[in-house]
Every structure is written in C-alpha cells, then in structure tokens.
Image (cartoon, helix red, strand yellow):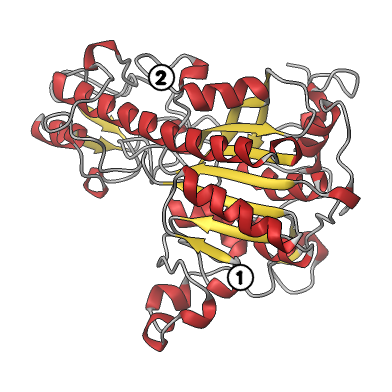
Amino acid sequence: MHSLRHLALLVILLACVPLQAAQRPNILFILTEDQGAQLGHIGTPGLQTPHMDALARSGMYFRNVFVAYPVCSASKAALYTGLHNHANGILNNTVNYAKHAAQLTPQERKHPLYLSNGVHASIPTLVERLQAAGYYQGATHKLHVAPVEKFPYDEFIRHNNRAEVAGFIARAAKTGKPWHLFYNIPNSHRPFPNSEKVQIRVKPDEVKLPAYLPDTPVVRRDWAEYLAAIEAADQVVGEGLAALRASGQEANTIIVFMGDHGPCFPHGKMTPYDLGLRVPLIIRTPSMQAGVISDALASELDLTPTLLDLLGLPADAPPLVRRGDDPAARCFSHSAGSGLDFHHFSTLKNCSPTFHTSPAPRVMSRSPLRVFSSRTCSTLAASGAKLTSRCPYLFMSSTSLSAVIPGIGSSPAG
C-alpha cells in the first residue's frame, strides 16, 4: 500500500460527516480469537452469525484482509504497533499477564518469554498513544502481549458479557474521557464445543470443507464444531453491541471487528497460508455509509495508523534502521507523512492440488501437523498423511487503497 493512511481515507470518504479531533469518538475494538474469514455475511455454508452480519451491514466489510503473523501474541503485537514482528519485537506467543504492571511479581517478570518476547521500549503501542490522547481504556479476557508497561490499560476485565461492557462504559463516563475497549473474545479458539457431549446448531452435512481437508464424517464434525464456536463468539459480540446501544453512546463510537488469525486446522493457525492469514474485518464509524463491501487488499498493520488518523492523532512512526545509518537500509512499517510511497506484504496460497488419495494422502504444509490437536489431524495421521513443502507460492503485492476509491485513482493495469 502507498500509505496505511489510505485505509483511513477510504473509511473517511465514505462517511457523511468527518470526525473532528475536538470531539474524539470512543473505540470498541472487537477481536475474536482463531476466527478466519468465516461468517454468515459472506455466505459460509452452515454458519449463522446474525450479530456480526448486522455489524457488517451497518458499516464496511473488507474481504481481502490478512494478518502479519498467524499466531495470537504476534498478531496482536502487529496490530498494536503497526509494525511487522521482526521490527516490533514479538515473534511468537508470549506469556499472558492481564493485569497492571505494578501487580507483576518478581517471578513473573523473570519469565524467559516475558524477558525475550516483548515489544521494544522505543516503539509506541496503540494503547500508549491513546493514553497520551486522554482515553480511558479497558481490555477484556486477556492481554497476551508484553511487556505490560507498553499496554497501560486502566482496566483489565475478566469476563465478556453485556454487564461487563455496560459497567466499563459507565465507569469511563464518570471520567469525562472518551474510551477505548478492547473486547477480546476467546469462544472461537479451540477447544470447540464437543458435539458428542453438547448439542450444536451447525450440521456437519451442511458445511463446506476447505478443499485440502479430507472429506470424512470426523473432519466434517470438527469443522462444524469450529463454526459452532464462531456462533458462540457471535453471541458475545451481540452482548457487547447491546451494551453499547443501551449506553446511548453508539452514535459516537468507532467499531472495529476482526479475527486475530485463522483457525487451528492444517494450513490454518501457525501456517502462512490463506486459511491462517485471511481474517474478517469490519469498520464502522459514526455517520459512515452502511453496507459497503471492499475488495481492497489490506493488512492488520493498517489498523493502528487508520484509527489514529480517524481520531486526528499523528500516525507517523520513526524509521527502523537495520544496518548502521545507511538510509537505503531503513525499513518503515507505514508511510503516513514519511515520504515513503510503497508498502508490500505477501501471503501464501497453495495453487496446486493439496490432497491426494493414492497411494496415501499428502498434506501440503510447511508446518508440522503435530502442532495441532484436533479430530482433523487425528484423521490425517491415521490415514498415513505425509508432509511436503513442494507447493508453489503465490506472492500477492498490495496496492494503494486509494486506487479503489471512486474519483481518487484508477485500478492498476493487469
């Protein structure tokens, strides 16, 4: 992308009334765990997500959105900083300390992952930027990024439900500050509802499996249980949105909905394939046009600078120098005001057949199946599935989002 500012431009140009920095809106950021681009709004067979769908219809849905890293902590770090993980400092999952920095014990601070896998001190996070702008902030369920000092939330809220969201909004109102609630929803994460023990609405014979998964009753049940977990997450989304409506502050609240990465299946979570990297994204701003669908290629790296732009806050980040002071070695995560006019990221797609029935199934994957624990992987292992990395890669270069905005630019040739 030419500039991550273009995602904000796309949203702003679709709004009837521009947002004014003097009266900054609230932010409700809804993040579902391990939810790929599966929801009712885009026609996922067998799935019903009325609350997510209603939100998409009331705002803008992005169909081609990819995360920077397909695992929880690393994806969140990219989201919070607008920087790729080799630049921000979190390269994999870290420990989860969902509490204020002053409450950490000496033993917790000495945890090897906490010491080695955290956002660099010199890089500002979205939470720090919003704190400096006068926001009252809260996060639900968990933090799962480090160090805690870089994420100075006013509240860490254990549960996700309407009462908790309503309580946070009420407490924020007493401060007289705009608020930011990071509404982290774990329901779509494994373990999924076990349909052998609890009834689920999703029927295995109505789902459509990814082409590279074996079409067996066990795998269909596993996928159906994943969709049932998304439906459970949808209910939690509905509770949060209901609390927001009841507060009377919905008209002055930016809502962002996103999955943190794809689901825990082969070619999904922890792999750089489409199922692991592609996620749903919905943005709704006050007074913006409803029911818009964008096919623009976008990244989670766009979201922090986009939100800062929408709030009228500076979105620039200092250049990162890889080697000495050579200007040619500088690497930028985004270019708002920096003069850099390009930004590329890549996603991997398997362009060749990915499942063979003879002599034995082979799963094209660059990540060992042993990182997963599921019905699907048990089926693959039992069938004698073998791993190979010979699949071709399709590298997709992003283009400026301004090219897809009517009247701003033309689509690139080819």
* Image-based side of 99 in relation to 291, left or right: left
Badge 1 crowding class, 10 Å Cα cut-off, few under 14, some 14 to 19, many 20 or more, is many
Which quadrant: the C terminus?
A: top right
* Image-based side of 29 in relation to 19, left or right: left
**Residue 292 x, y percent position in the rendering:** 70, 19
Q: Residue at x 70, y 70 (%)?
A: 323
Q: Is residue 313 above or below residue 48?
A: below
- Please name the residue that numbered disc 2 is placed on: 48
Residue 284 picture quarter: top right
Q: Residue at x 24, y 25 (%)?
A: 200
Badge 2 crowding class, 10 Å Cα cut-off, few under 14, some 14 to 19, many 20 or more, is many
Q: Is residue 236 above or below residue 69?
A: above
- Please name the residue that numbered disc 1 is placed on: 150
Q: Amino acid at mark 1?
A: Lys
Which quadrant: the N terminus?
A: top right
Q: Which of the two residues, 227 or 216, is positioned nearer the viewer here?
A: 227
* Image-based side of 371 in relation to 257, left or right: left
